[in-house]
Amino acid sequence: MASRRVQTKMAMRSKLHLLRTLINSKSVKKNYIILDAFIYIMKLRLQLEAIQREYQQLLNHVQEVKVEKFIGTRFLVKVTCKKGKDVLVSILEVFEDMKLIVVQARVTSRYFFGMEAIVEAENEATLDVRALTRALQMAIHKQSFEYLK
């Protein structure tokens, strides 16, 4: 029975030593090590909450529209923005209004909406890169307000 107590005491000392090392505590008394551990956990929790707030803020403000000349009458369109209801539909409506044909597209919407597409104009004269960029930006901006309603 005495040997069990000794083993338990040794195991407890070993765990306290490990805890003390993990949290970088200078304390030697059990109560102070536990208090230091509690403070350490609270600090980690605050750091996690700050990271989560920053992550949400980044997701809410991410917006990029990039249109580049590709080959001939084809253009590369890259869109990154906050996820919202019917964002893809709004973008496709812009393409349709500007008489563009989607040749190829990749879309993701895991954490944010992202699309990379190759679109083709009937002829080079029909597509103004700046006009397409502005139209896409307006569609995304309009969608972000629609999403809030």
Image (cartoon, helix red, strand yellow):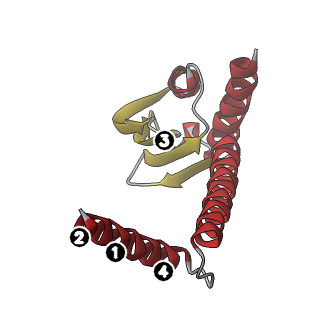
Instruction: Say what amino acid the circle numbered 1 marks.
Output: Met
Q: Residue at x 55, y 19 (%)?
A: 86
- In the rendered image, which residue does mark 2 sit on? 3
In the figure, 10 relative to 71: above or below? below
The answer to which of 17 and 24 lies nearer the viewer is 17
> How crowded is the residue under tag 2: few (<14 C-alpha within 10 Å), some, or many (20+)?
few
Q: Residue at x 68, y 38 (%)?
A: 137
* Between marks 4 and 3 in the image, the one whose residue lies nearer the viewer: 4
In the figure, 10 relative to 86: above or below? below
In the figure, 144 relative to 14: above or below? above
Determine whether, in the image, residue 4 is placed left or right of residue 125: left
Kindly check if marks 3 and 2 are in contact, taking CB atoms under 8 A apart as contact: no
- For marks 1 and 4, the one nearer the N-term is 1
The answer to which quarter of the image holds residue 60 is: top right
Q: CA distance from mark 4 to mark 3?
A: 44 Å
* Between marks 1 and 3 in the image, the one whose residue lies nearer the viewer: 1
- Check the picture and name the quadrant holding the C terminus: top right
Q: Residue 21 has which mark?
A: 4
Instruction: Say what amino acid the circle numbered 3 marks.
Output: Gly
- For marks 1 and 3, the one nearer the N-term is 1
Disc 4 element: helix
* Between marks 3 and 2 in the image, the one whose residue lies nearer the viewer: 2
Which residue reaches farthest top?
149
The answer to which quarter of the image holds residue 70 is: bottom left
Disc 2 element: helix
Q: CA distance from mark 4 to mark 2?
A: 27 Å
Please state the horizontal and vertical placement of residue 118, each as a whole percent of the image: 39, 43
- In the rendered image, which residue does mark 3 sit on? 114
Q: CA distance from mark 1 to mark 2?
A: 10 Å
Instruction: Say what amino acid the circle numbered 2 marks.
Output: Ser
Disc 3 element: strand
